[in-house]
Image (cartoon, rainbow, N blue to C red):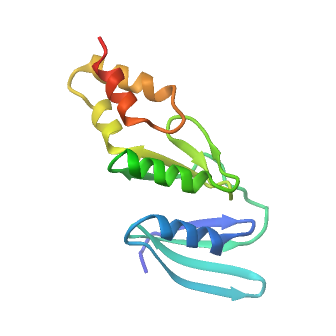
């Protein structure tokens, strides 16, 4: 077990959520499910990082103050993750952020966005960043076009 582990409190659906999450990313798996005294505890690994989650009622809903960021290699990965996470009641937001159907916030970020934001030409970086601010799901081709515009 990791020394530091993110713990996610669900009203309900912790096991279903973990199953979805591990199906989406390589190096992911369910480690254990414990159903005791009406509480379900789920330990899982998501892209090599361990998480623990629990069904424990509505006392502590998720907020955007905490999110899971996934750095994506290409547009296909952005599209696949975005579509899977907003399916069945999730909600798109701005700048690559979304909420899944349980209300957990995610940032689906193409690595290319970070490269463009750190471009040595500050005007290219500014144009790419301004384009990103107008997007919900990040579109790499649109970012590159904005960065290249003069």
Image-quadrant location for residue 27: bottom left
Q: Residue at the location (61% across, 71% down)?
A: 53
The image shows residue 108 at horizontal and vertical percentages of 47, 47
The foreground one among 23 and 42 is 23
Q: Residue at the location (70% across, 70% down)?
A: 13
Q: Is residue 150 above or below residue 95?
A: above
The image shows residue 6 at horizontal and vertical percentages of 52, 65
Q: Is residue 36 above or below residue 29?
A: below
The image shows residue 24 at horizontal and vertical percentages of 47, 64
Q: Residue at the location (58% across, 46% down)?
A: 98
Determine whether, in the image, residue 134 is placed left or right of residue 120.
right
Q: Residue at the location (28% across, 20% down)?
A: 148
Quadrant position of the N terminus in the picture: bottom left
Determine whether, in the image, residue 141 is placed left or right of residue 95.
left
The foreground one among 118 and 142 is 142
Quadrant position of the C terminus in the picture: top left
Image-quadrant location for residue 25: bottom left
Image-quadrant location for residue 61: bottom right
The image shows residue 84 at horizontal and vertical percentages of 55, 56
């Amino acid at each position: 077990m990791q020394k530091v582990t993110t713990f996610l409190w669900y009203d309900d659906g912790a096991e279903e959520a973990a199953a979805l999450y591990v199906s989406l990313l390589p190096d992911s798996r369910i480690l254990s499910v414990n159903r005791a005294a009406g509480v379900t505890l789920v330990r899982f690994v998501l892209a090599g990082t361990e998480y623990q989650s629990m069904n424990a009622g509505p006392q502590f809903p998720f907020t955007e103050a905490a999110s899971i960021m996934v750095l994506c290699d290409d547009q296909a990965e952005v599209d696949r993750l975005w579509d899977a996470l907003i399916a069945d009641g999730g909600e798109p937001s701005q700048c690559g952020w979304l909420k899944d159907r349980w209300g957990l916030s995610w940032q689906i970020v193409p690595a290319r966005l970070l490269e463009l934001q750190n471009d040595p030409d500050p005007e290219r970086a500014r144009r790419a960043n301004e384009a990103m601010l107008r997007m919900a799901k990040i579109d790499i081709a649109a970012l590159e076009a904005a960065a290249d515009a003069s």
